[in-house]
Amino acid sequence: KNEVEQSPQNLTAQEGEFITINCSYSVGISALHWLQQHPGGGIVSLFMLSSGKKKHGRLIATINIQEKHSSLHITASHPRDSAVYICAVRVANFGNEKLTFGTGTRLTIIP
Amino acid sequence: DTAVSQTPKYLVTQMGNDKSIKCEQNLGHDTMYWYKQDSKKFLKIMFSYNNKELIINETVPNRFSPKSPDKAHLNLHINSLELGDSAVYFCASSQDPARVGAEQYFGPGTRLTVT
């Protein structure tokens, strides 16, 4: 079982819908990242959070450390939001820290 | 200005060959990483360097050897390429990962195809 689980694996929605992508993890972490990978392949860091909530434009990320759970929300979704969204957690690794990734959620927004 | 750059973007080569992928970052970061993304789009860390020193070395075959000539560069050399090495390889950089707020910045990726 992967240390980081995302749901759903695939999500198709109409333009304008409110989107929620979930991430659960089973290890102690120091931070959690949400990444976006566009069809062209490039990866962009959207958020890094260790508690509470962060907001950038139409994107909102929340984390509940006690429940080991994070959500990424997209309000007023748009076709340009179509991408793979990847959750990654930062875990200690023999005194150093490394990112462990979820398998990603493929989001498709239909006009 | 490209923050993290990789060359080449595409690399097609035959089994048994030796190849290198170069990575450079102009962000002044201390730490650089190599990740492998397989055909199922799953990302996994391979190596991490902090100030030219290897700090993370996952279970990667000895055929893979990272080299960091300075803080701004982390190259990946692969010997005796195998079909299973076909993947997209991403370089990334960050400030000291132990620091709060140390986001990672990714390069555009290098798609390696071994035939």
Image: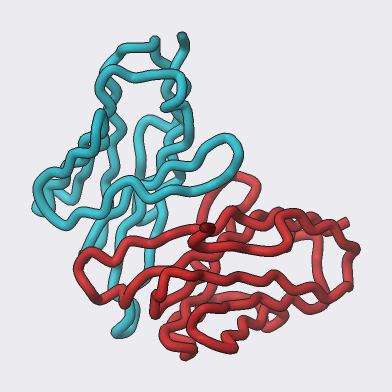
Measured as percent of width and height from the top left, residue A15 is found at 38, 11
Which chain can be seen in cyan? A
Q: With respect to residue A21, does A96 lie above or below? A: below
Q: Nearer the viewer, residue B103 or B26?
A: B26
- Residue in the image at 67% along x and 78% along y: B64
Evaluate whether residue B63 shows in this view.
yes
Measured as percent of width and height from the top left, residue B16 is found at 88, 72
Label count reads 0
Q: Nearer the viewer, residue B76 or A6?
A: B76
Measured as percent of width and height from the top left, residue A60 is found at 21, 35
Q: With respect to residue A15, does A68 lie above or below? A: below
- Residue in the image at 56% along x and 78% along y: B73
Query: For residue B40, what is the image quadrant?
Result: top right
Q: Nearer the viewer, residue B62 or A46?
A: A46
A22 left or right of A66 in image? right
Evaluate whether residue B35 shows in this view.
no
Measured as percent of width and height from the top left, residue A108 is found at 47, 22
Q: With respect to residue B13, does B95 lie above or below? A: below
- Residue in the image at 81% along x and 70% along y: B81
Query: For residue A20, what is the image quadrant?
Result: top left
B77 left or right of B115 in image? left
Colouring chosen for the image of the structure: by chain
- Residue in the image at 41% along x and 75% along y: B28
Give the quadrant of the C terminus of chain B: bottom right
Which chain can be seen in red? B
